[in-house]
Image: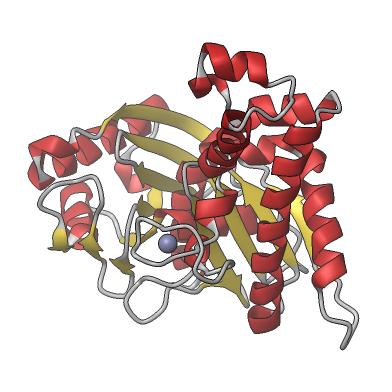
Amino acid sequence: MTYFLGIDLGGTNIKTGVVDDNGAVVSKHSQPTEGKYGADRVLKNMVDAAQTVVDAAELTLKDMAYIGIGSPGPVDTENGIVISSPNISGWSNYPMRNLIADALGRPTVLANDANAAAFGEYWVGAGASPDIQNLIMLTLGTGVGGGVIVNGQIISGTCGYAAEVGHMIVQPDGRECGCGQKGCLETYASASRTAVRACEMLAKGKASSLQAIYKSDPQQITAKAIFDAAAEGDELANEVIDQTAYYLALACISLTRILDPQMFVFAGGMALAGDALLSRIRQHFDAQNWHAAPNAVTLEIAQLGNDAGLIGAAAIAWDANRND
Ligand SMILES: [Zn+2]
């Protein structure tokens, strides 16, 4: 058996896992990132977390064929450098790969965390079939994250900014996005923004079973509450979800024109809605999609759940090992 160590570096927690070459998690561990204390502290925490999870698997670092790190924000994968990181102070052009490789004594690879998670789905998740070599993942959470796999490889772009699918413009002159653009996909179709759109309609006094919840605590209007109401036949909830699905479908069509993928994989909290979301995206996709040639792209829900980040990090380690 070959083992890989995955390190999923989040803004809040560092999640580590020892993963075997079938993608099974042998052991896992989570501890606070402590990003506010600066880069050196985070690096130390990553090293400690790695040792802890290897001990928990009753293995040693020498048993790890490769170490993979998934880091938020843009990274230079070739040189193993974190270009910048949204939640960790002092990380600018930080040579993380070599620092971890030196500290742990094993060959190490680095990727953007969303790209790594997509690669995990490609390896042992929704896209695990060997026939699937072209896959795009959209993660629907606070924002909309993404990863693009073409010919079995992560596309990271010139400066590590590729696959930012959440910042595709889907509405000309639309809602303002934190990135400086207007009308980005994530300003309409993330889980949080879906809830915001529902609250805007509820604030206008439109009839809905969600009104009582909204009046007592608007924070309780979550994507899940909206899907639950829609399942009970609530019209407003159905309208909100339909619009979310519409924008996601537009984004998927544009991505399909450029990349001709075999599969879209939807991850994140809102993807837990399953077919209630997928069937609507499919409907809009088929209605708007071109007729120039048949298109067999499938829409799937991600399979790796809460372990997606660490399995993704292990997946890039597995990939580096197979290409060694
Ligand atoms: Zn944006």
- The answer to whether residue 120 is seen in the rendering is no
Say whether residue 134 is left or right of residue 155: right
Q: Nearer the viewer, residue 13 or 167?
A: 167
Residue placed farthest to the front in the image? 204
Within the displayed image, which quadrant is ligand 1 positioned in?
A: bottom left
Q: Is residue 243 above or below residue 251?
A: above
Say whether residue 147 is left or right of residue 35: right
Q: What residue do we see at 59% from left, 56% from top?
A: 138
Q: Nearer the viewer, residue 24 or 148?
A: 148
Q: In the rendering, at what x and y percent does residue 78 appear? A: 31, 75
Say whether residue 303 is left or right of residue 230: left
Q: In the rendering, at what x and y percent does residue 179 appear? A: 35, 61
Q: Is residue 37 above or below residue 68?
A: above
Q: Nearer the viewer, residue 146 or 143?
A: 143
Q: What residue do we see at 66% from left, 50% from top?
A: 266
Q: In the rendering, at what x and y percent does residue 320 appear? A: 44, 66
Count of picture labels? 0
Residue placed farthest to the bottom in the image? 292
- The answer to whether residue 248 is seen in the rendering is yes
Q: Nearer the viewer, residue 258 or 200?
A: 200
Q: In the rendering, at what x and y percent does residue 273 appear? A: 72, 35
Q: What residue do we see at 60% from left, 33% from top?
A: 204
Q: How is the image coloured?
A: secondary structure
Instruction: Determine the image quadrant of residue 306.
Output: top right
Q: Is residue 306 above or below residue 316?
A: above
Q: Quadrant of the C terminus?
A: bottom left
Q: What residue do we see at 48% from left, 57% from top?
A: 175
